Image: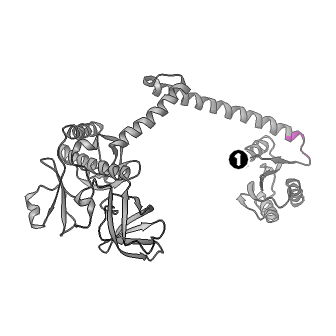
């Protein structure tokens, strides 16, 4: 492990190393291997580091068959026997905060309620742990969060130690280690003992804070979403900004925001219902107007940019008003034609058959029943021409 500088000192930001090899992997991606590196490769739930090597962006870092591969944006010059690497420290320290915070939170869940952590994911915005319990109470989450932040405030040390498999019996591990060699323990003395290959700060105070955001049941487990460190400050700032904008828009103080939003939603629902009723009334007037223009029991019309749902409603109103009516509607919507064909109960013409004969003119698709059918296709002809075809099929 001596060539992995992030284990010797996770605070290393720059380093120099010799180029061991330069290759292209099976997917055509260029990478280099160094004799030592401070770049952490993806593993143990922690994402890889990024940064630069000789001012070339490091896009990905993976450990494959014992070698740490640094995938670069462009190739190195052949003359670079020794290179200079720079770690993106903001990203590295964020991962250190989040990973240590996860250890603290998982240990707190186990100490207080015996809930074991069986899954962990460190994302770009939030983290999640999967707990071995089907239910999590709000009171339990609050107690765990309180204990976690107390551990942070008290500034407990975070130690790392390399041990053999035989030495593991000396430690009260939170979970069994997966590896049998090169076992690395991350220890918060008298609180948490855990096998882990990630990067962590020297003490709990550097985690700054832990905030549980939400949780949900996942099969027979509970997935807890949370954030640590600078992410708490960043999200608080973002959410506060949104909240302040809402107070201006809703003309209500923060403490009344929930009531103001609920009132706005209810008013919106009421307005939506009223609008639906108005549109329904308009459709009835439109149906009456079209019936007045009916010729030989056929109500036909062309439209521009009318939705298929709108035409269906209008057609149903017409055949409800006149059971002998046949309805033929065509709407031109951008580069498509939409068709609706309907008949009242007193008519016997199959609308499904009419639709089937009309759709080939526009390479269309549709369906329905003998009494009501709809379809659509490419606007290969005008809506007036399509209506003419429908009338010819009916006649």
Quarter of the image that includes the N terminus: bottom left
- From this viewpoint, which residue is outermost toward the right? 295
Rendering colour mode: one colour
From the viewer's side, name the closer residue of 379 and 154: 154
**In this image, 355 relative to 82: left or right?**
right
Give the image location of residue 215, x and y in percent: 35, 45
Q: Residue at the location (59% across, 31% down)?
A: 268
Q: How many marks?
A: 1
Q: Can you see residue 242?
A: yes
Q: What element carries label 1?
A: helix
What's drawn in magenta, residue-wise?
290-296
Task: Report the residue at 53% width, 25% height from top.
Answer: 248
Q: Tell me residue 240's x, y (percent).
A: 44, 32
Q: In which quarter of the image is the C terminus?
A: bottom right
Camera-side residue of 53 and 313: 53
Of residues 192 and 28, the one nearer the viewer is 28
Q: How crowded is mark 1: few (under 14 residues within 10 Å), some or many (20 or more)?
A: few
- Residue 261 is left or right of residue 235, and the answer is right
State the image coordinates of residue 233 (x, y, percent, origin top left): 37, 38
> Which residue appears farthest toward the left when viewing the image?
170
Q: Is residue 221 above or below residue 353?
A: above
Q: Is residue 261 at least partly visible in the picture?
A: no
Given the current orientation, which residue lies at the most extreme front position? 79
The residue tagged 1 is 309
**Residue 362 coordinates in the image, percent (x, y):** 80, 62
The stretch drawn in magenta includes residue 194: no
Does residue 48 sit above or below 94 in this rendering?
A: below
């Amino acid at each position: 492990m001596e060539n992995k500088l992030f284990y010797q000192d996770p605070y290393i930001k720059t380093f120099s190393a010799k180029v061991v090899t330069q290759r292209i992997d099976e997917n055509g991606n260029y990478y280099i291997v160094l004799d030592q590196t401070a770049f952490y490769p993806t593993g143990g739930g922690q994402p890889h580091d990024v940064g630069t090597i000789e001012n070339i962006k490091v896009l990905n870092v993976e450990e494959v068959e014992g070698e740490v591969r640094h995938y670069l944006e462009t190739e190195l010059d052949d003359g670079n026997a020794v290179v200079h690497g720079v770690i993106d420290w903001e990203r590295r320290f964020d991962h250190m905060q989040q990973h240590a915070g996860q250890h603290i939170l998982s240990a707190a869940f186990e100490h207080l309620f015996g809930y074991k952590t069986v899954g962990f994911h460190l994302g770009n915005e939030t983290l999640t742990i999967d707990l071995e319990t089907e239910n999590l109470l709000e009171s339990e989450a609050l107690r765990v969060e309180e204990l976690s932040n107390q551990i942070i405030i008290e500034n407990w040390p975070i130690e790392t130690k390399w041990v053999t498999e035989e030495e593991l019996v000396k430690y009260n591990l939170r979970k069994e280690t997966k590896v049998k060699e090169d076992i690395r323990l991350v220890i918060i003395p008298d609180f948490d003992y855990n096998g882990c290959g990630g990067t962590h700060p020297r003490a709990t105070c550097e985690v700054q804070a832990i905030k549980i955001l939400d949780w949900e049941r996942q099969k027979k487990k509970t997935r807890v979403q949370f954030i640590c460190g600078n992410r708490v400050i960043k999200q608080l700032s973002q959410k506060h900004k949104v909240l302040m904008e809402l107070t201006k828009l809703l003309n209500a103080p923060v403490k009344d925001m929930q009531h103001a939003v609920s009132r706005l939603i209810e008013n919106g629902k009421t307005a939506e219902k009223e609008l639906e009723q108005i549109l329904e009334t308009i459709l009835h007037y439109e149906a009456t107007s079209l019936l007045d223009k009916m010729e030989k029991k056929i109500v036909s019309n062309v439209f521009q940019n009318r939705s298929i749902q709108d035409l269906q409603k209008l057609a149903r109103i017409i055949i409800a008003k006149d059971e002998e009516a046949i309805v033929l509607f065509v709407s031109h919507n951008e580069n498509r034609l939409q068709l609706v064909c309907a008949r009242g109960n007193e008519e016997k013409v199959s609308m499904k058959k009419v639709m089937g004969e009309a759709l080939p003119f526009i390479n269309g698709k549709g369906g329905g029943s003998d009494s009501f059918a709809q379809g659509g296709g490419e606007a290969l002809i005008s809506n007036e021409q399509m209506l003419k075809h429908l009338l010819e099929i009916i006649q």
